[in-house]
Amino acid sequence: MRVPGTRRSLLILLLSIFAVFVSVLAFSSREEDEGPNISWAPPYPALSYAPEAPSARDLAVYLTNQMSDEEALAQTFMLGWVGAEPSPLIMDWIKERGIGGVKIFGWNTDDTRRLAETVGELQRAALDSGHGIPLLVATDQEGGLVRHVKGATSETPGNMAIGASGRPADAYWAGYYIAQEIALLGVNMNFAPTVDLFTDRNSVLIGPRSFGDDPLQAGILGAAFMRGQQETGMIPTAKHFPGHGATALDSHGVLPIIDADLDLLWERELVPYRHLVAEGVPVIMSGHLAFPNTPGGRTPASLSRWFLTELLRGQMGYEGLIITDDLMMIGATVYTGSLSRAAKQAIEAGNDIIMFSQTPHLNDAIWTFLLASMQSEEDFRERVRDACRRILTLKLEQLQGDGVPLIPDLARVDQGLLDPQGSAFFLSLAARSVTVTHNEGGLIPLQGEEAGRILLVGNFTDFINYGRRAFPGAASYWYGTTASGPSAALLNQARNADTIIVSVSGPGGLRILEGLRPLGKKVIVFSVLSPVFLEDLDWVDGALAVYSYAPESFIAGFSVLLGRIESQGRLPFSVQGL
């Protein structure tokens, strides 16, 4: 009899426990590498009469001892693939190698139903091969700016909006509803919460992905976000250890060098992680960042034994999984000069899972180099097998019961991912987070004749559309994000306006704004994403901040402008002049 795919996870765990009890008497007296091979198949009725089972960790130790070096190494691999459908190569890695996980990127996800089908195909391949160990299926669904699973999922206000509301309950429910949606698609691990602090205001990578610059608040909100995800069965991941917020550089293209010493890190960037470790966060992602003023030196933290083993595990007492950020990022490979060496150094440093955004060939140098190193270096072999034990422990603890289904229920997916209560929550979060930062002349809220003729100037279609709904008679002008200043056409429109509402989300918007300043019109800035661009704008008549380009954020922002709701948000970081 073939067991339905959606129930395989629970059966996997139950049979594993049964197999241990078959040999439990011999287990205590034999060498660790002896004992029956465990077959991941349907359980026996007699299992219901078995005594109390050993822990997931004990069972993971036993299972790892039954695995070959190749099988143990494969569990440490998490691979991405190109396209909406499973590539032949990723299927080969699952069927022939038995890799431990797959990573879903934005290029896999435009069609959410097809994504659910793909996850089901990948999990069936894993369950039907080798030991039948299910996959970790991961993605980046942080909310706000980073939303790798697109299609029918919610656009949300994001972390900085949560920081502006300041409510742990908002973080909890954001984590819950985001995880609930992707869980229906079979995603069981989410690379969130992002607990990087917004320390460097010029950061192009973090920005509104951060809860703000307060370390304690970031830890509290991150822990609440984590708990919300766990309520759905999702495995949360805190990132990017030890903190990506104190640099304007992007580790996708370079290795950022951060000057902070250990004392500063301990009291600033590491505070959220210290809080999350105490709260039992199950997974932490290591970042490709160098801190030359610490004992880690110029080695990327993701490849540093000092950061991951001595600091994170030793001093901070962390016992969960550690996973690398994508090793194909320049921030990792620039240090070693080789992807294979970067992968080995990552495992030696203390990472349990090495992640690659692309799928290597089966006998790529990455695989052959790591396997050869296992066979020639006993310390490396034991480190890989230790990582495998940690991975299997997590799977035995998490991928079972009533949590995230291994095989998505397509009928449930077809009913829709959006929860009406979730949609109402995200709108209310957007409303609570709107922050009025300038209102010297009392222009906000805009009232009838006082506003006069209104011109909407924006770089987001939703800004223009919702602005027209708020002010039906308003004129509008759309500009590109790389604008060098107002065009002649915009200036002509602006001269005929009394009040100009300008959306600003980057340098292009600032150039537009400065070009309109000499006209002497009433100007209101509608800041989108990070509100750092509100610095030094004491000349404007009014300004408000929303923290994403989700429709809810524009609806909430214009509701504040109209006076239909009051502004409740507070900037979650200090801005010069505010």
Image (cartoon, rainbow, N blue to C red):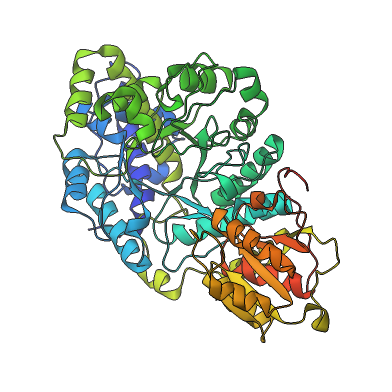
Q: Which quadrant would the N terminus be assigned to in this image? A: bottom left
Residue 60 is at least partly visible in this image: no
Which picture quadrant has residue 346? top left
Name the one closer to the observer, 424 or 550: 550
Quarter of the figure with residue 499: bottom right
Q: Residue furthest bottom?
A: 473
96 horizontally vs 101: left or right:
left
Q: Position of residue 304 (x, y in %)?
A: 43, 20
Residue located 72% across and 49% down the image: 536
The answer to whether residue 127 is left or right of residue 478 is left
Left or right: 356 in relation to 154: left
The answer to whether residue 137 is seen in the rendering is: yes
Q: Position of residue 73 (x, y in %)?
A: 26, 29
Depth check: 546 or 70 in front? Answer: 546
**Location of residue 541 in the rendering, given as x and y in whole percent from the top left corner:** 78, 64
The foreground one among 419 and 331 is 331
